C-alpha cells in the first residue's frame, strides 16, 4: 500500500512544556511476564522460607528486599541508590507487594544484617531452582564447568583481599568459584572466597557437593566435568575417579619437566584437523599413584611480526606452534575430547553477561554477607531469565560435542529492550485493574506469547 507524503511527515513547531504529576504510569510493563513466572515458581513463599528462622525482621522483610534486588537486576540498574529512579513505579510496587519501596539506607542496613544461615538457605534456593529445571529435562548427560572469577572493588569491604587481578593489580577483591550447567547456561552454585586464594582453594569439597546435588535429581545421568589447569591435582582427579565422573582438565605442562621434555622431543604427531596435530600417552607425575590419559595438542599459528612493515613488499608469515595438554578419563577419540574441552569457553560468556548486564562485578556494601546476598540476587536474576526462555521457547538443540546450551538464549539486555522496558498505564475500567499499553502488534504478540506459554507450562 502506497502512503502519501502528507500522511508520513509532520512539522515540529515547538518543544513541549514539561509537567510532572502523579499518574499510574510504568516504564516496565514487561515485568508482568516475570510476575507470572514468579507466581509459577512460588518464588515469594520460597524466599520467605529462607528467612523464617529470623526472629526479628525489618518492616519490609528480608524476602522482599531480596526480591527487590532481583527486580533491580532485571531492570538493568547497578548501584543501590538507583532505586530512587523507579521507586514510584506502580508495577514494580505491585510485583513486590508493597505500597512504597524502601529507601537506600534501609536497603543497605537490611543487607548488612543478614546472617550466615540465611545466606546458605538463599544459596540453596538458587541451586534448587536450577535442579528443578534439570529434573524436568531428564537429561542423560549433564556437563558441569568450574572456574573462578575476580570481583574487584575500589574500597574496603569485609572479606576482600589483594590477590590475582590481571586488569587492576593491587585492587582488593573477592574470588568466588562458580559451577555452571552447560546445558541450560545457569549457575548451579557458588563458593564465596577472598581475593587472595588460589583457584583450587576449597574446590575439592565444592566439587563433590555440586556433583551430589545433580545426582540427587538425576541419579542415572552421566555427569562430566571440565576445568582449567588450576584444578590439576592428584586429589581432585582421585575424587572424580572415585565418583565415576567423566572429566577433562587442562594440564600446566610447563611446570612438569618430564612431560615438557616428551612434548619437545616428540617427532611423530597425528593429524587432528587442518590446524592441529596431537599425540596421547599414558603417563603420571612421579608423586602420583596411577597413570592417566594425557592428550598433547599443537596448533599452527602465525608468529607476530614486530619490525616495521613496508606495504609495497611481500613479507611471508613465519609459522609457529601453540601447545596445550589435557588429562581425561574419556574413552572417545582425541578429536572429540579436545572439542569437548574447548567448549568450556561458553562459561566465559556466562561470566561476561553476569558482569556486564547483571552487575556481578559490583560490591555494594562493606559487609561480606551483604555482598553475598547481592551476588546471589544477580545469579537468581540470570537463572530466572534463562528459566523464562526455557519455559516459553521450544528446545532447539540436542547434546553436541562442545556441549552447547540446548536453547539459543538471548542476553538479558535484549529482553530488557524488547520486553521489559515498555511504557504503560494502570487503569481501572469498570473497577478491573488493567495495564494499558501503546498499540504495537509486535509487542502485543510477543507479550501474549510469553504469558500464554508460562501459563501452559505451569
Image (tube, grey):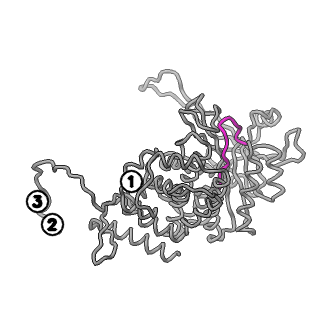
- For label 1, the SS is loop
Q: Which residues are magenta?
A: 189-200
- Say whether disc 1 or disc 2 marks the residue closer to the N-terminus: 2
- Which residue is painted at 18% across and 69% down in the image? 1
Q: Magenta stretch: residue 341 in it? A: no
- Which residue is painted at 36% across and 63% down in the image? 29
- Which residue is painted at 31% across and 76% down in the image? 431
Mark 1: give few (<14), some (14-19) or many (20+) Cα within 10 Å: some
**Residue hosting label 1:** 87
Marks 3,2: beta carbons within 8 A:
no
- Which residue is painted at 51% across and 66% down in the image? 38
Identity of the residue furthest to the top in this view: 308
Q: Which mark lies nearer to you, 3 or 1?
A: 1
- For label 3, the SS is helix
Question: What distance separates the C-alpha of mark 3 from that of mark 1?
Answer: 43 Å
The reply, left or right, for residue 149 in relation to residue 90 is: right
Residue 121 coordinates in the image, percent (x, y): 65, 58
The reply, left or right, for residue 376 in relation to residue 295 is: left
The reply, left or right, for residue 411 in relation to residue 348 is: left
414 or 321: nearer the eye? 414
- Say whether disc 3 or disc 1 marks the residue closer to the N-terminus: 3
Residue 53 coordinates in the image, percent (x, y): 65, 60
Mark 2: give few (<14), some (14-19) or many (20+) Cα within 10 Å: few
**Residue hosting label 3:** 5
Identity of the residue furthest to the right in this view: 289
**Residue hosting label 2:** 2
58 or 210: nearer the eye? 58
Magenta highlight: main SS:
loop
Amino acid at each position: 500500500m502506497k502512503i502519501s507524503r502528507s500522511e508520513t511527515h509532520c512539522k515540529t513547531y515547538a518543544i513541549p512544556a514539561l509537567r510532572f504529576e502523579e499518574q499510574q504510569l510504568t516504564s516496565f510493563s514487561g515485568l508482568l511476564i516475570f510476575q507470572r513466572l514468579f507466581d509459577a515458581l512460588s518464588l515469594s513463599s520460597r524466599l520467605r522460607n529462607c528467612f523464617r528462622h529470623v526472629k526479628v525482621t525489618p518492616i519490609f522483610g528480608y524476602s522482599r528486599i531480596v526480591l527487590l534486588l532481583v527486580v533491580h537486576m532485571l531492570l538493568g540498574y547497578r548501584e543501590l541508590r538507583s532505586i530512587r529512579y523507579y521507586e514510584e513505579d506502580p508495577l514494580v510496587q505491585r510485583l513486590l507487594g508493597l505500597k512504597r519501596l524502601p529507601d537506600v539506607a534501609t536497603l543497605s542496613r537490611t543487607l548488612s544484617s543478614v546472617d550466615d544461615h540465611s545466606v546458605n538457605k538463599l544459596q540453596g534456593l538458587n541451586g534448587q531452582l536450577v535442579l528443578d529445571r534439570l529434573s524436568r529435562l531428564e537429561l542423560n548427560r549433564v556437563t558441569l564447568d568450574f572456574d573462578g572469577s575476580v570481583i574487584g572493588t575500589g574500597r574496603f569491604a569485609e572479606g576482600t583481599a589483594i590477590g590475582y587481578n590481571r586488569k587492576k593489580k593491587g585492587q582488593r577483591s573477592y574470588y568466588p568459584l562458580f559451577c555452571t550447567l552447560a546445558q541450560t547456561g545457569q549457575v548451579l552454585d557458588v563458593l564465596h572466597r577472598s581475593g587472595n586464594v588460589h583457584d583450587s582453594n576449597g574446590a575439592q569439597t565444592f566439587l563433590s557437593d555440586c556433583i551430589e546435588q545433580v545426582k540427587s535429581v538425576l541419579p542415572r545421568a552421566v555427569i562430566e566435568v571440565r576445568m582449567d589447569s588450576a584444578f590439576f591435582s592428584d586429589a581432585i582427579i582421585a575424587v572424580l575417579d572415585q565418583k565415576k565422573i567423566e572429566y577433562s582438565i587442562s594440564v600446566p605442562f610447563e611446570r612438569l619437566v618430564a612431560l615438557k621434555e616428551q612434548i619437545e622431543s616428540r617427532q611423530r604427531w597425528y593429524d587432528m584437523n587442518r590446524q592441529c596435530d596431537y599425540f596421547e600417552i599414558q603417563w603420571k607425575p612421579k608423586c602420583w599413584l596411577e597413570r592417566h590419559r594425557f592428550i598433547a595438542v599443537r596448533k599452527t599459528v602465525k608468529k607476530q611480526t614486530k619490525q616495521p612493515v613496508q606495504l609495497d613488499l611481500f613479507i611471508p608469515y613465519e609459522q609457529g606452534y601453540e601447545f596445550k595438554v589435557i588429562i581425561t578419563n574419556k574413552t572417545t577419540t582425541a578429536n572429540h575430547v579436545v572439542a569437548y574441552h574447548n567448549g568450556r569457553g561458553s562459561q566465559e560468556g556466562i561470566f561476561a553477561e553476569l558482569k556486564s548486564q547483571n552487575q556481578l562485578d559490583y560490591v555494594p556494601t562493606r559487609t561480606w554477607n551483604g555482598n553475598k546476598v547481592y551476588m546471589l540476587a544477580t545469579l537468581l536474576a540470570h537463572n530466572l531469565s534463562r528459566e523464562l526462555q526455557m519455559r516459553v521457547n521450544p528446545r532447539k538443540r540436542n547434546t553436541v560435542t562442545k556441549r552447547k546450551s540446548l536453547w539459543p538464549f538471548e542476553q538479558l539486555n535484549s529482553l530488557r529492550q524488547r520486553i521489559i522496558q515498555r511504557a504503560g498505564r494502570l487503569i481501572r475500567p469498570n473497577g478491573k485493574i488493567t495495564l494499558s499499553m501503546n498499540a504495537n502488534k509486535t509487542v502485543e504478540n510477543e507479550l501474549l506469547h510469553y504469558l500464554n506459554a508460562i501459563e501452559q507450562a505451569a
